[in-house]
Amino acid sequence: MSSISQVKTVCGYCGTGCGLILDVEDNRIVKIRGDKEAPVNKGQTCVKGAFGYQYVHAQKRLNTPMIRKAGELVKATWEEAYNYISSRLTGIKTDFGPDSISMFACARTTNESNYITQKFMRTAIGSNNIDGCNRT
């Protein structure tokens, strides 16, 4: 019989920084609740923070880069993936201009990650075409 361990963490759905306690059994999250000692949320959670963890253990979740070659997705190294992305973005920007590229940011990441995302788009790419999924 396995035991349930409790792991304190910070929610990754938005940049608020709510404290969470994960109940973990056999290296799998089985329950999430708010951390009453966390100053930001004082034990409260939103629906996403409390119940949106199934994706962590999804069987179809990607865990390695994939590149389409000859119509098929094949596993690639991170270096191959980054080189491919760089090459494609450079080509698209050259052929169609910087406004032909957009970026979709995610509420599941931190404010700092979203900040660097928009900074990359505006400075490296030269585009203001940025959107996100936090408009629920």
Image (cartoon, rainbow, N blue to C red):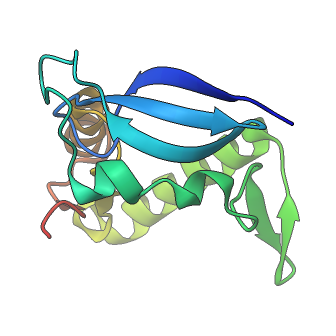
- The residue at the point 52 percent across, 22 percent down is 7
**Of residues 98 and 32, the one drawn nearer to the viewer in this rendering:** 32
In the displayed structure, would residue 58 be above or below residue 25? below
Residue 28 falls left or right of residue 95: right
> In this view, which residue lies farthest toward the bottom?
71
Residue 10 falls left or right of residue 60: left
In the displayed structure, would residue 111 be above or below residue 70? above
Q: Position of residue 115 (x, y in %)?
A: 21, 33
Quarter assignment of residue 6: top right
> In this view, which residue lies farthest toward the front?
1
Residue 121 falls left or right of residue 44: right
- The residue at the point 55 percent across, 35 percent down is 23
- The residue at the point 22 percent across, 65 percent down is 99
Q: Quadrant of the N terminus?
A: top right
Quarter assignment of residue 124: top left
Q: Position of residue 84 (x, y in %)?
A: 67, 52
**Of residues 95 and 44, the one drawn nearer to the viewer in this rendering:** 44
**Of residues 58 and 122, the one drawn nearer to the viewer in this rendering:** 58
Q: Position of residue 11 (x, y in %)?
A: 34, 35
In the displayed structure, would residue 9 be above or below residue 1? above
- The residue at the point 21 percent across, 18 percent down is 38
Label tally: 0
Asked whether the viewer can see residue 60, the reply is: yes
Quarter assignment of residue 12: top left
In the displayed structure, would residue 77 be above or below residue 41? below
Asked whether the viewer can see residue 105, the reply is: no
Q: Quadrant of the C terminus?
A: bottom left
